[in-house]
Amino acid sequence: MERRYSDYSEKELRDEIARLTEKAQKAEQLGMVNEYAVHERKIIMAKAYMMNPDDFSAGETYEMDGDYVHTFYIQYMNGIFAWGYRKQQGQKVSTEEEALPISMLGRQVQE
C-alpha cells in the first residue's frame, strides 16, 4: 500500500521528487506524453506538501506557475489546496471554482 505524501518527511519528499523527476525525464525522452504528465502532476503534489499553506491567504491573488496570462484568486484554503478562480487582467475568467495545489502558485499580485 502506498503512503500518502502528507505522511512523508521533508527528506522523503525531496527523494520522491528526485525519483519522479528522473522518471519524467525518461518518459519524455521515450515520447510517452501521458506518463510524463502523470509524473509531473505527482511532482507538483509532492512539492505542495513541502510548502506552508499559511503563506497563502484567502482574498488574495497570486501568479500561476507556467501560466503567464492568468492569475489565481483564492476564495478559501483547504490544506494544501487553494480554492478559487482564474483571472485575466483583473477580470474573472471562469464561473467554475477550481482547486490548485499551492505549489502551482507564485508570488502575490497587487491588483
Image (cartoon, rainbow, N blue to C red):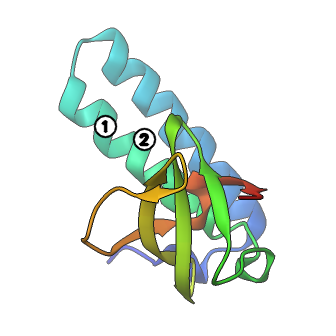
Tell me the quadrant of the picture where the N terminus can be found: bottom left
- Residue shown at 35%/10% (left/top)? 29
Reply above or below: 78 against 42: below
Q: Callout 1 environment at 10 Å: few (<14), some (14 to 19), or many (20+)? A: some
The quadrant in which residue 40 appears is: top left
Mark 1–mark 2 CB contact (< 8 Å): yes
- Residue shown at 58%/42% (left/top)? 65
Tell me the quadrant of the picture where the C terminus can be found: bottom right
60 sits to left or right of 3: right
Reply above or below: 57 against 68: below
What type is the residue that disc 1 sits on? Ala
Reply above or below: 24 against 96: above
Give x and y (percent) for residue 16.
58, 52
For label 1, the residue is 37
- Is residue 102 something that shows in the picture? yes
Give x and y (percent) for residue 21.
53, 34
What distance separates the C-alpha of mark 1 from that of mark 2? 5 Å
- Residue shown at 76%/61% (left/top)? 11
The quadrant in which residue 56 appears is: bottom right
What type is the residue that disc 2 sits on? Glu
Q: Secondary structure at mark 1?
A: helix
Q: Secondary structure at mark 2?
A: helix
Give x and y (percent) for residue 7.
58, 83
For label 2, the residue is 40
Give x and y (percent) for residue 96.
25, 71
